[in-house]
Amino acid sequence: MILLGSMFAGSPRPLGPRGIPSSILKAAIVGPWTISASGLVGDQQADTVNHGGTDKALHHYPHEHYAAWASDMPEIVQLLASIPAFGENISTCGMTEDNVCIGDVYAIGTVRLQIAQGRQPCWKLNARFDVPDMAYRVQKTGRTGWYYRVLTPGRIKPDTEIKLDDRPQPNWPLTRMIDLLYTRTAAFDELTAMSELPELADGWRKLAARRVASRKVETWSSRLESDKT
């Protein structure tokens, strides 16, 4: 049984050398929690172009990854001591990128959420952890977490079970999609199939379609590199 014990929210604060507003620094808020079509009520987004919106209403980051990061990078253990270190709204044990699929629908009480896409790590993780290539490390390891769209808004009580309600795309675990985007980048037949998944966020479907059409991998540097200027 997987229980939702806490939820996390944040508000914009200066981040990085230029003090760009970000809500990556979140904290637990007292439940029950209200979930609207745009996400957790009380959670704010500083960058509404790249964060938030229908397909990125809530961010889930597996708690199992904390131990893996602590083992890989002892220098950030202090920052990992308290959840949420990765700007997530939800962190649980038992759900990881290899056992959840694009399009999965989860019921938490009366609220229904659907996995819409994985997280594309950005430079804000570098600033958060004071590690120049942290975003790249998150991408390379596949420990990205994922985003939900809200199918049915409502209220969630603490310690409510997260139940898998539907799995329309069992052949598309998130690990497969991460592999296609960042490792097997020229698997054009699979990318074509990815671009046609109706449950996948529109932005990721278009990304896959553009790569197939151009036969070129998009540039990642502006997303992954630190905010140094």
Image (tube, grey):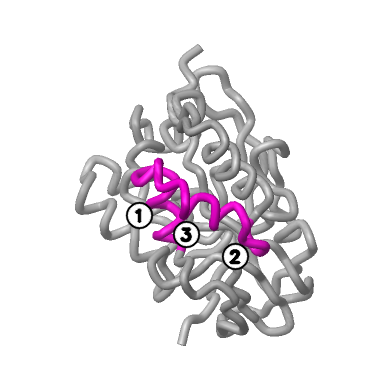
Amino acid type at circle 1 is Ala
Q: Residues within 10 Å of mark 2 (few under 14, many from 20)?
A: many
Q: Which residues are magenta?
A: 174-200
- Image x and y of residue 46, in percent: 69, 37
Residue under the image location 69 percent in, 43 percent down: 45
Question: Which label number is shown at residue 61?
Answer: 3
Q: Main secondary structure of the magenta part?
A: helix
Q: Is residue 65 left or right of residue 12?
A: left
Q: Residues within 10 Å of mark 1 (few under 14, many from 20)?
A: few
Q: Which residue is mark 1?
A: 81
Mark 2 vs mark 1: give the one in front: 2
Specify the quadrant of the image occupied by residue 99.
bottom left
Residue highlighted by disc 2 = 115
Residue at 40% across, 42% down:
185
Labels 3 and 1: the sequence-earlier one: 3
Q: Secondary structure at mark 2?
A: strand
What residue do we see at 61% from left, 35% from top?
22
User: Closer to us: mark 3 or mark 1?
Assistant: 3
**Label 2 – label 1 distance at C-alpha:** 27 Å
| SS type, badge 1 | loop
Query: What whole-number distance in Å separates the C-alpha atoms at marks 3 and 2?
Result: 12 Å
Residue 153 x, y percent position in the rendering = 78, 71
- Along the horizontal axis of the image, is 178 left or right of 49? left
* Closer to us: 179 or 156: 179
Q: Nearer the viewer, residue 208 or 89?
A: 208
